[in-house]
Amino acid sequence: MSRLHVHTERHAFARIGWLRAAVLGANDGIVSTASLILGVAAAEASHGSILTAGIAALAGGAMSMAAGEYVSVSSQSDTEKADTARETRELRDDPEAELDELSAIYAARGLEPELAQQVARQLMAKDPLKAHVRDELGISDTHAAKPVQAAITSAETFAVGAALPLLVAALAPPSSLILAVSASTLVFLALLGAAGARTGGAKMGAAVIRVVLSGALAMGVTALIGKLTGTVV
């Protein structure tokens, strides 16, 4: 007697929608706020001015991330809806041509032509639109555009990321503020890169190096500009 074993798999790809927005938001929050703090501090501004700039960066950045993500992902969603509507019309007007098109897709993936047509017929008999949207357009529930989810995730993670260097700047003595913010930000970025890689199932070392180096470059350039501006002014 044979026994049926259910093999359950969990792929990191299923998290790609919210993970991209979360990593982008947190990384942007940490880097942009830390860079702004360092730029203002390098211009020899007062501690109060530095904290004010940091708070403004947190609030404005979170709202900007939410709006930007919502608009961009909404554009993707609109395109998906338009393509789905067009596919609906094509299935209504010429179902045989759509059957041949779906069969050709499966044949191109390695199925024998006759088997490909059988598979296409069976799938179209059950849910033709879903079959075409998934296999012709490449749209699935896993990575379909979700504007609200992307906006909320980006705003929340940006705010959390921005709060980290801002907190360090608030607690650090003015004399060592630049060093404290710089060092702690690199640590925060390393942790973010490691967490993102672990959640997404990617290699941790490469992710950490990529995030830390890009953040260090951004902070260095901004601090230099602040220093030059402060000297001139």
Image: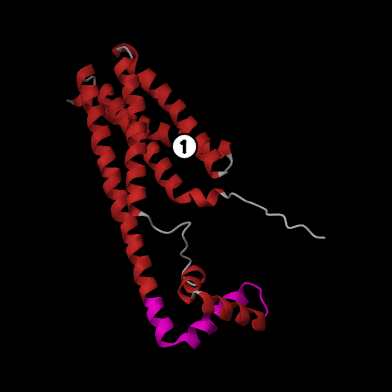
Residue at point 65%, 82% (across, down):
113
Q: Amino acid at mark 1?
A: Val
Main SS of the magenta part reads helix
Residue at point 26%, 48% (across, down):
67
| Residue 44 visible, this angle | yes
Residue at point 46%, 64% (across, down):
139
Q: Nearer the viewer, residue 33 or 155?
A: 155
Q: Position of residue 60 (x, y in %)?
A: 23, 37
**Magenta residues?**
86-112
Q: Nearer the viewer, residue 233 or 107?
A: 107
Q: Is residue 130 left or right of residue 159?
A: right
| Residue 221 visible, this angle | no
Q: Position of residue 151 (x, y in %)?
A: 32, 47
Rendering quarter of residue 111? bottom right
Residue at point 40%, 84% (across, down):
92
Describe the element under mark 1 as helix, strand or loop.
helix
What residue sits right under mark 1 in the picture?
Answer: 211
Answer above or below: position of 56 versus 231. Answer: below
- Name of the residue lying farthest toward the right: 1
Rendering quarter of residue 156? top left
Answer above or below: position of 68 versus 131. Answer: above
Residue 110: say if magenta.
Answer: yes
Q: Position of residue 39 (x, y in %)?
A: 28, 27
Q: Nearer the viewer, residue 207 or 120?
A: 120
